[in-house]
Image (cartoon, helix red, strand yellow):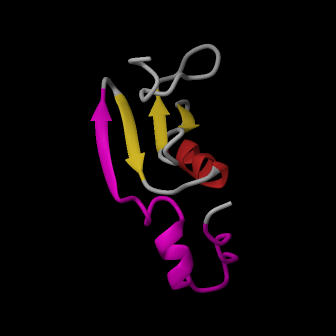
Amino acid sequence: MPGPHLPPPHAPFTVDALLARWPSAVEKVELVSGVLLFTGDFDERDVIVAERTYPGRRGLLNADGGIEIHPAGPGQPRSILDAGA
């Protein structure tokens, strides 16, 4: 897993957590065909936090380590990076 865990709620943030965890480590955000695409080096912990930020939507960790936030719907979302494949 890239990056450290978030510090406990009573502890201050560390520089490592600031630079590694979503949303503070987002390098860029784009809107692609109605899907939010957050560029960075994330893991499943960050997807869980992103889904809490956008209730009802579905988060996906793509092959590049970015987070995609898809509209609600059945099944697992398909990465927009795979859409052309």
The x and y percentages for residue 31 are 29, 35
What number of labels is visible? Answer: 0
The x and y percentages for residue 72 are 52, 22
Q: For residue 46, what is the image quadrant?
A: bottom right
Question: Going 49% across and 27% down the picture, which residue do you hit?
Answer: 79
> Where are the magenta residues, as a range?
3-32
Q: Nearer the viewer, residue 57 or 37?
A: 37
From this view, report whether residue 30 is shown above or below residue 14.
above
Image quadrant occupied by the N terminus: bottom right
Q: Nearer the viewer, residue 34 or 78?
A: 78
**Left or right of 41: which side holds 31?**
left
Question: Going 38% across and 18% down the picture, which residue do you hit?
Answer: 84
Question: Going 38% across and 37% down the picture, which residue do you hit?
Answer: 36
Q: For residue 9, what is the image quadrant?
A: bottom right
**Left or right of 40: which side holds 1?**
right
Question: Going 58% across and 46% down the picture, which residue do you hit?
Answer: 52
In magenta stretch: residue 29: yes
The x and y percentages for residue 76 are 63, 22
From this view, report whether residue 51 is shown above or below residue 8.
above
**Left or right of 78: which side holds 76?**
right
Q: For residue 2, what is the image quadrant?
A: bottom right
Residue farthest toward the top in the current orientation of the protein: 74
Q: Nearer the viewer, residue 17 or 10?
A: 17
From this view, report whether residue 71 is shown above or below residue 64.
above
From this view, report whether residue 40 is shown above or below residue 60.
below
In magenta stretch: residue 79: no
Image quadrant occupied by the C terminus: top left
- The chief SS type of the magenta part is loop
The x and y percentages for residue 57 are 52, 31
